[in-house]
């Protein structure tokens, strides 16, 4: 498959250039080499078609870029393995992903990062971009060897779900990262206000008798981080924003000249605390699902670009971790295979053009990871052919059987969502193909 | 797959399968439980305090959290219905040694249990059990929530309604105040849902701001931080127990200061209607939430509550398990 592939009859959508046209794509030696028509016009001189992929009725877009997918390696192989989660990524059209450092052991040593990236280096695997630990063991006390970790392949530094309580350490960590212009990715969550809480501190938690986490847990942390970034000039990315108030602070900080990006998860984009229903442990998430007002603000913010990216926040949890009383259940939901359908669902509900919606899962997150200039998240001639071909009319039933991830835990179980990935190409290799019948070899 | 979208305590015909929470139960179901309890309260007066309604049935008292009082009243209720009662105190330490909640349930279900009476420290645990039984086609095993975390204690709520009806006859002309630690109280939540479903026009909650959940007013109650103001003209005062671990710390400075502002004294009770009744789910902290002069006074109906509790629990068990 590596040379002479003609993707025929599709609708080409490249959010980076706001392109949405009917055109064919030509791929040779793992790279995009031409855009043209079904007669072969647009292919470079000497291009020899060795295989044809019929994309009639499908959208052809850059492979998706996901800012957070837990692969559960090393340390949690009983929940998922690299193989199972890479199969899920490919089935979800995801060709690049960042993985948070909360593995066991934590990604705080270059050797561990090298091992992970080495394990992940298979042609059908999505590109893995590790986020290194900002502090040793994520304990919020000692800085990690960031320069070494960066050489080993870390694209940013973060704390996963753990916060740095000591503001002196936080300031130093941000200063040190700024020294080398390393990006820092943090989830804003005050440790004390979120302690013991399991749900948004609102009427649902009041009714169900669940301990609450107030919005102030997020806004207080955002306020501290923004103030420290104003001093240090660190490139900060705020992970998993959940509240309207938090988003408003980020928007205000930007207009005051502070350089900060942020993301929202597919779960917070679509659900609210009401979706906890009768103690549905699949809706036990970190941060908690918030109110209708918060969700509306997040949806509008992602549409306007105030929120830069949408992430699956993929977190496979096994049944033992979820078949528990709500407050004892583990947090997180599987998501790699839902990222595209939930992007399309949001786009349809908000009446957004596909170029805008797909930007939040392609070029925009690629800019945050820092791989956009190398061609990630876009259809750029000469760049690696990371391509997703999906049928926007087809539907995806979220069921245990249909999910390739080892984690079957998602609040969307049982729902039918729009859009179905037909093919995923990584470096021009077929990483996923729902059926092979459309591909003919000439 | 667990179905967590549908209310698991009612079947497709709106009939009661399990008793998990008062929230979402129609008024006629509540009234039917109260009506059914009336003849059962007479069983206790007989020389042979037994009826054969649950003969041959096995009731498992599954207590993941210690409670002698509630467990005993359930045990008495089941025995008066002629059921076989098996008491299991599964404290959290042995549960944390490995066996999951659902493994425990599966094991007991394999011993041909007909009914689980569940007490658990986590809100929603009885729902998980009911959802699991439904997912494994064992809905014939009924679940009664005997208190889950901060969420619900429906039989306590029902026995309180029985008590109120016994003394006040009609719910639709009453003003009722629930006083104390609403935030952590499963009893308060069940009482509030029951009172509102039964048509009580004014339900008040009285507590300091640290002991009120956010958005409690959307449960249909009026919030008072001043106890004297909140007690003015009420027909029923429902006191709540204040847990020891909450008396000193970030929620409250001291039991003495709490008593001063929120303890029910004869002086404060005098602000209620002269025929107001005083209730408490027990066990009481005398001198913390209630003055002994009130607890032992003429207006207190705290001991009748305990007696009615057995009749109400018999009614619930008979309706669920009597076929």
Image (tube, helix red, strand yellow):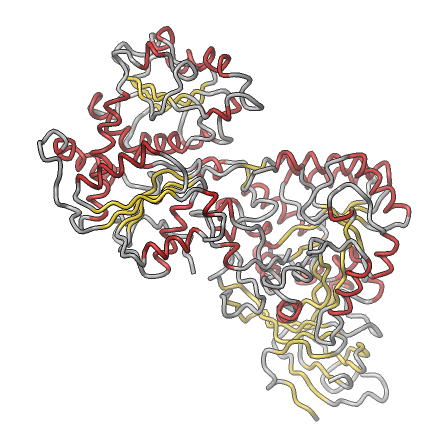
Closest to the observer: A356 or B40? B40
Closest to the observer: B140 or A356? B140
Left/right placement of residue B296 relative to residue A143 reads left
Task: Reply above or below: A22 against A439.
Answer: above
The residue under the point 75% across, 78% down is: A428
Closest to the observer: A412 or A115? A115
The residue under the point 22% across, 41% down is: B78
Left/right placement of residue B120 relative to residue A344 reads left
Which quarter of the image is occupied by the N terminus of chain B? bottom left
Task: Reply above or below: A427 against B238.
Answer: below
| Res A354 quadrant in image | bottom right
Give the image location of residue B244, x and y in percent.
47, 24
Give the image location of residue B79, x and y in percent.
20, 41
Task: Reply above or below: B190 against B238.
Answer: below
**Which residue lies most toward the bottom here?**
A442
Give the mark count. Answer: 0
**Which residue lies most toward the right here?**
A179
The residue under the point 84% across, 56% down is: A149
**Which residue lies most toward the top here?**
B267
Left/right placement of residue A40 relative to residue B22 reads right
Give the image location of residue A331, x and y in percent.
57, 50
The residue under the point 63% across, 40% down is: A244
Give the image location of residue A54, x and y in percent.
65, 83
């Amino acid at each position: 498959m590596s040379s002479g592939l003609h993707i025929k009859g599709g609708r080409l959508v490249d959010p980076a250039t706001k392109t949405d046209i009917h055109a064919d794509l030509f791929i040779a030696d793992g790279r995009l080499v031409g855009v043209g028509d079904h007669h072969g016009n647009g292919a470079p001189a000497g291009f020899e078609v060795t295989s044809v992929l019929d994309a009639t009725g499908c959208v052809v877009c850059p492979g998706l870029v996901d800012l957070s997918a837990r692969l559960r390696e090393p340390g949690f192989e009983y929940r998922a393995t690299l193989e199972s989660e890479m199969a899920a990524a490919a089935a979800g059209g995801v060709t690049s992903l960042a993985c948070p450092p909360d593995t066991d052991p934590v990604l705080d040593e270059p050797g561990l990062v090298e091992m992970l990236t080495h394990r992940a280096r298979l042609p059908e695997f999505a590109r893995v971009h590790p986020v290194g630990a900002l502090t040793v063991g994520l304990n919020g006390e000692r800085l990690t060897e960031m320069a070494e970790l960066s050489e080993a392949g870390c694209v940013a530094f973060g704390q996963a779900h753990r916060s740095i309580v000591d503001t002196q350490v936080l300031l130093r960590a941000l200063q040190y990262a700024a020294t080398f212009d390393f990006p820092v990715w943090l989830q804003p969550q005050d440790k004390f206000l979120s302690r013991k809480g399991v749900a948004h501190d609102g009427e649902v938690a009041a009714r169900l008798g669940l301990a609450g986490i107030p919005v102030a847990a997020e806004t207080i942390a955002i306020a501290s981080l923004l103030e420290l970034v104003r001093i240090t000039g660190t490139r900060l990315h705020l992970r998993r924003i959940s509240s309207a108030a938090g988003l408003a602070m980020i928007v205000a900080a930007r207009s005051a000249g502070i350089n900060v990006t942020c993301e929202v998860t597919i779960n917070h984009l679509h659900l609210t605390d009401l979706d906890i229903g009768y103690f549905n442990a699949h809706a036990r998430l970190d941060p908690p699902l918030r109110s209708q007002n918060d969700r509306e603000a997040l949806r509008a913010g992602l549409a306007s670009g105030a929120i830069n990216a949408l992430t699956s926040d993929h977190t496979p949890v096994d049944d033992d971790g979820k078949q528990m009383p709500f407050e004892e259940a583990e947090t997180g939901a599987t998501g790699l295979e839902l990222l595209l359908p939930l992007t399309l669902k949001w786009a349809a509900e908000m009446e957004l053009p596909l170029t805008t919606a797909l930007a939040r899962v392609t070029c925009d997150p690629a800019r945050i990871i820092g791989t956009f200039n190398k061609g990630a998240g876009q259809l750029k001639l000469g760049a690696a052919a990371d391509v997703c071909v999906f049928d926007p009319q087809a539907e995806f039933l979220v069921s245990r059987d249909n999910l390739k991830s080892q984690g079957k835990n998602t609040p969307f179980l049982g729902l039918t969502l729009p859009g179905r990935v037909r093919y995923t190409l990584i470096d021009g290799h077929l990483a996923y193909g729902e059926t092979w019948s459309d591909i003919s070899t000439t | 797959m667990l179905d967590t979208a549908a209310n698991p305590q009612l079947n497709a015909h709106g009939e009661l399968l399990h008793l998990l929470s008062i929230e979402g139960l129609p008024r006629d179901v509540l009234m039917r439980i109260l009506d059914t309890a009336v003849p059962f309260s007479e069983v206790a007066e007989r020389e042979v305090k037994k009826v054969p309604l649950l003969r041959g049935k096995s009731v498992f008292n599954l207590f993941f959290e210690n409670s002698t009082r509630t467990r005993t009243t359930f045990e008495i209720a089941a025995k008066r219905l002629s059921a076989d009662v098996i008491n299991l105190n599964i404290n959290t330490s042995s549960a944390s040694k490995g066996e999951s909640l659902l493994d425990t349930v599966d094991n007991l279900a394999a011993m041909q249990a007909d009914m689980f009476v569940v007490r658990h420290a986590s809100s929603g645990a009885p729902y998980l059990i009911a959802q699991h039984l439904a997912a494994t086609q064992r809905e014939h095993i009924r679940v009664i929530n005997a208190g889950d975390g901060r969420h619900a204690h429906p039989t306590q709520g029902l026995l309180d309604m029985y008590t109120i009806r016994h003394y006040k006859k009609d719910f639709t002309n009453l003003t009722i105040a629930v006083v104390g630690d609403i935030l952590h109280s499963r009893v308060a939540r069940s009482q509030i849902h029951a009172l509102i479903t039964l048509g009580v026009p004014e339900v008040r909650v009285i507590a300091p701001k640290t002991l009120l959940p956010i958005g409690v007013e959307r449960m249909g109650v009026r919030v008072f931080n001043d106890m004297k103001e909140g007690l003015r003209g009420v027909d029923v005062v429902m006191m709540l127990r204040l847990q020891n671990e909450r008396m000193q710390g970030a929620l409250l400075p001291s039991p003495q200061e709490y008593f001063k502002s929120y303890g029910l004294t004869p002086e404060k009770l005098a602000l209620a209607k002269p025929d107001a009744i005083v209730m408490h789910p027990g066990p009481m902290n005398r001198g913390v939430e209630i003055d002994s002069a009130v607890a032992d006074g003429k207006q207190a109906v705290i001991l009748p509550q305990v007696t009615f509790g057995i009749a109400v629990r018999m009614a619930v068990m008979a309706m669920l398990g009597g076929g």
